[in-house]
Each structure stands twice: as structure tokens, then as C-alpha cells.
């Protein structure tokens, strides 16, 4: 058994552009980056997928976690501030996998129909682990089909997909097709993406598996460090 997690840590430029509450709670981005890194350094999951990682955040993780393999995909799109200069030194946006132990990178690709989202796949602990961030519009149909293709690219491998899918579990299940299982959350679970208004689902971050068993999924409150909470689960190979 291994444990896995996924968390959208919220890129600072996106937070500023959309007026996210995290800006008020963490006006100093350097302090927030340090707090995110400290939270992740204290976790013991074998694999952690991170979305919306800024270049500054990635640098902090590399400095603080020399004992973990850090795989990263830098997107071609660089977030552009709409309300003045950003405090970030590196505005680049990354999809990241933190791996405790050896891992072999299989693919790292932005989606063809969205240069600001993509997939990062690594083989580790007998699994093909795919981190992803999926677009929150019609482009997701093609992207989910592409994720299913990537999951089938290594014949015989059990698969774990970790990410911010921007859609509810039923839509993810439909888009990926048969053979995939989405981890069940407790009935009283915290939202993975809390919202105070709007029709969009509050459960858009998922742990999905194929040919393995997933259980004990839990959403953990990150206390305002991001607009998403962290999701973790146990996977039995």
C-alpha cells in the first residue's frame, strides 16, 4: 500500500487576477510560499501532485525537500498580472509531482488545446502516476480522452490519476470511460474547492485509479493557504 495526495496550491497571479480570499489572508506571498512548503514537508505521502505551482514555490520546494524527487512540467503559458506587477520573481506555472523514492518520468506535456494545463506521468512503486490539471470548459472533453490514452500508454501498468479536474466526479467518470474508479469521499467531507456562490461543483479535485484499489480518501483543510483543500487516499497495488 502507498499513500497519495493532490493539491492545487493556487498560483499567486491567478489569485490576484481573480481576487481570491487568500490575498487578504496572506498579503505576503513569500510567507505563503514558506507555509505551503512547510505543510508539504511535513506530509508523508509517497506521491503528492501539485497544480498551479509558481516558479518561486517550486524553488522553495527544491530547497526544502532535497530527499524527495521533484518532477515538474512548466507550461508554455505564463500567467500575466492584470492589476499591476506581481511579487513573484518567476511567474512560470508548473505541474509538479513530489515522489518519496525513485521515479521514472514517462511524459510531461501541456494539453494541445490549452497551454496552461496538462499532464505529468511518472512510474514509481509499481504504478503509473499521472498528475493533471484539466480546463474548466469544453476543452476538458478532449483532455480527459487524452488522459485515458496516457493511462493506456504503458501496457500492464496500474494507474493513479491525481489532480484538479475542474468538474465533478460524474463528468470525470464519463470522460475517462470504463475501467477507472474515483475515490469516494465521506458523506460529510469538506469541499475540495469551497465556494460561497455559483453553480460549479465544490468537489473537483479527484484521485482516480485503474487496476488498483483506492480507499480512505479524506479532504484536509489547508486553513486558507489556497482556494483548494488537499485530498489524500491510500492505494493498494
Image (cartoon, rainbow, N blue to C red):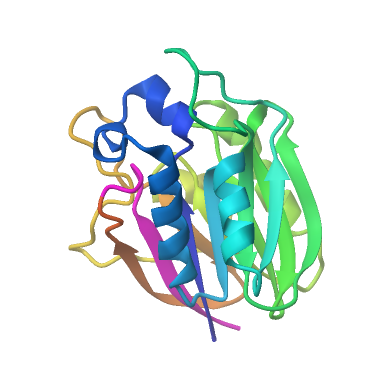
Between 107 and 149, the one nearer to me in the picture: 107
Q: Is residue 63 left or right of residue 193?
A: right
Q: Is residue 65 above or below residue 77?
A: below
Q: Is residue 137 above or below residue 99?
A: above
Between 95 and 118, the one nearer to me in the picture: 95
Residue at 45% x, 13% y is: 84
Q: Residue lying furthest top in this view?
A: 83
Q: Residue lying furthest bottom in this view?
A: 1
- The image shows residue 14 at horizontal and vertical percentages of 45, 28
Q: Is residue 17 above or below residue 7?
A: above
Q: Is residue 56 above or below residue 65?
A: above
**Res 179 visible:** no
Residue at 30% x, 63% y is: 220
Task: Name the quadrant of the C terminus.
Answer: bottom right
Between 185 and 11, the one nearer to me in the picture: 11
204 inside magenta stretch: no
- The image shows residue 209 at horizontal and vertical percentages of 56, 66
Task: Name the quadrant of the N terminus.
Answer: bottom right
Q: Is residue 127 left or right of residue 9?
A: right
Magenta residues, start to end = 224-237
- The image shows residue 226 at horizontal and vertical percentages of 36, 45
Amino acid at each position: 500500500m502507498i499513500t497519495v495526495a493532490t493539491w492545487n496550491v493556487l498560483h499567486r497571479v491567478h489569485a490576484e487576477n481573480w481576487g481570491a480570499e487568500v490575498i487578504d489572508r496572506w498579503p505576503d506571498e513569500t510567507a505563503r510560499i514558506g507555509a505551503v512548503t512547510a505543510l508539504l514537508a511535513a506530509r508523508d505521502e509517497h506521491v503528492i501532485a501539485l497544480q498551479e505551482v509558481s516558479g518561486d514555490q517550486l524553488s522553495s520546494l527544491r530547497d526544502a525537500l532535497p530527499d524527495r524527487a521533484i518532477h515538474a512540467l512548466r507550461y508554455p503559458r505564463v500567467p500575466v498580472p492584470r492589476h499591476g506587477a506581481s511579487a513573484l520573481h518567476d511567474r512560470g506555472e508548473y505541474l509538479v509531482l513530489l515522489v518519496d523514492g525513485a521515479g521514472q518520468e514517462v511524459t510531461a506535456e501541456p494539453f494541445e488545446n490549452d497551454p496552461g494545463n496538462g499532464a505529468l506521468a511518472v512510474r514509481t512503486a509499481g504504478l503509473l502516476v499521472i498528475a493533471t490539471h484539466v480546463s474548466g470548459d469544453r476543452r476538458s472533453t478532449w483532455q480527459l480522452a487524452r488522459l485515458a490514452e496516457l493511462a493506456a500508454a504503458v501496457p500492464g501498468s496500474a494507474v493513479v490519476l491525481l489532480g484538479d479536474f475542474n468538474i465533478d466526479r460524474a463528468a470525470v467518470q464519463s470522460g475517462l470511460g470504463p475501467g477507472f474508479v474515483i475515490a469516494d469521499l465521506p458523506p460529510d467531507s469538506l469541499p475540495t474547492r469551497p465556494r460561497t456562490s455559483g453553480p460549479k461543483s465544490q468537489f473537483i479535485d479527484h484521485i482516480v485509479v485503474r487496476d488498483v484499489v483506492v480507499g480512505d480518501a479524506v479532504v484536509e483543510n489547508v486553513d486558507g493557504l489556497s482556494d483548494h483543500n488537499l485530498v489524500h487516499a491510500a492505494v493498494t497495488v
